[in-house]
Amino acid sequence: MPEKQKFPKEGSILWELATGDWRGMNLRQIAEEMDCNTESIRCSIRTLKHNYHIEIDYDTRPVRQMDAVPDDLATLSEHSAVWKLINRDWSDCTLTEVSKELHKNSNGVKAALEELQRKHGITVPLKVEPPPQKMAGFKKQIDRSRYCKSCIYWNPTFRCCDYLAIMGGRRPCPPGDECTEHKRPAPRRRNKPTQGGQ
């Protein structure tokens, strides 16, 4: 019976999900980023959890549309998202963080900000979003591998640590330079040719 694969095949949708950084993004945003539909992403996340024991960190809350910006701001309730957007200090928050705080779709919040500027001349200062790190997880894995490749637990096929499979338990340390279980393979001895046929 062939051994069960421990990591998704490189280049597959499962591999892209497993190696990407999706924090703060919802299913629809992940689907847009990966150019597929939300149902494919939902199924792939379940497959990663069930078959590979890989949990994807993403925003699981249902997406709610942003409230419309009214022509008369005096009609806004103090409990509405637009009122909070105008009256709270968001200068230390990114668009993603504001959207999470308001429990709204980030595209809707962005559109509301633009409409506030256009209709009422109100600018809400936000912190600049960091650049997307789609492959951050995989890049970290490759950086660690420079140290890990010289270890007896390194699996060159799947480019990952095989400590769990070999030792039957979880590694008690993080991967890479901080690993306490790193072991170099024993040096190979070369057989010297015997003299005189001895």
Image (cartoon, grey):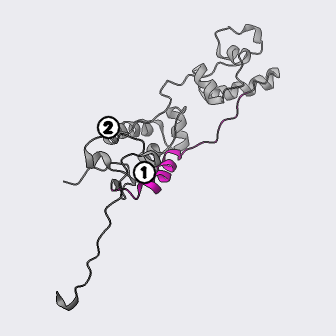
| Residue occupying image coordinates x 72% and y 19% | 89
Q: Amino acid at mark 2?
A: His
Residue hosting label 1: 12
Indicate the quadrant where residue 65 lies.
Answer: top right
| Residue occupying image coordinates x 76% and y 22% | 116
Distance in Å between CA atoms under marks 2 and 1: 17 Å
| Residue occupying image coordinates x 48% and y 53% | 142
**Crowding near the residue tagged with mark 2, few <14, some 14–19, many ≥20 C-alpha atoms within 10 Å:** few
Q: Could you say which is closer to the camera, residue 65 or residue 158?
A: 158
Q: Could you say which is closer to the camera, residue 92 or residue 58?
A: 92
Indicate the quadrant where residue 82 lies.
Answer: top right
The stretch drawn in magenta includes residue 151: yes
- Under tag 2, what secondary structure? helix
The C terminus: image quadrant: bottom left
Residue depth check, mark 2 versus mark 1: number of the one nearer the observer: 2
**Crowding near the residue tagged with mark 1, few <14, some 14–19, many ≥20 C-alpha atoms within 10 Å:** few
Q: Could you say which is closer to the camera, residue 169 or residue 110?
A: 169
The stretch drawn in magenta includes residue 129: yes
Residue hosting label 2: 50
Residue 126 higher or lower than 135, as above or below:
above
Q: Is residue 178 rendered to the left or right of residue 74?
A: left
| Residue occupying image coordinates x 55% and y 31% | 24
- Under tag 1, what secondary structure? loop
Q: Amino acid at mark 1?
A: Ser
Q: Which residues are magenta?
A: 126-152
Whole-percent x, y for residue 45 in the image: 40, 37
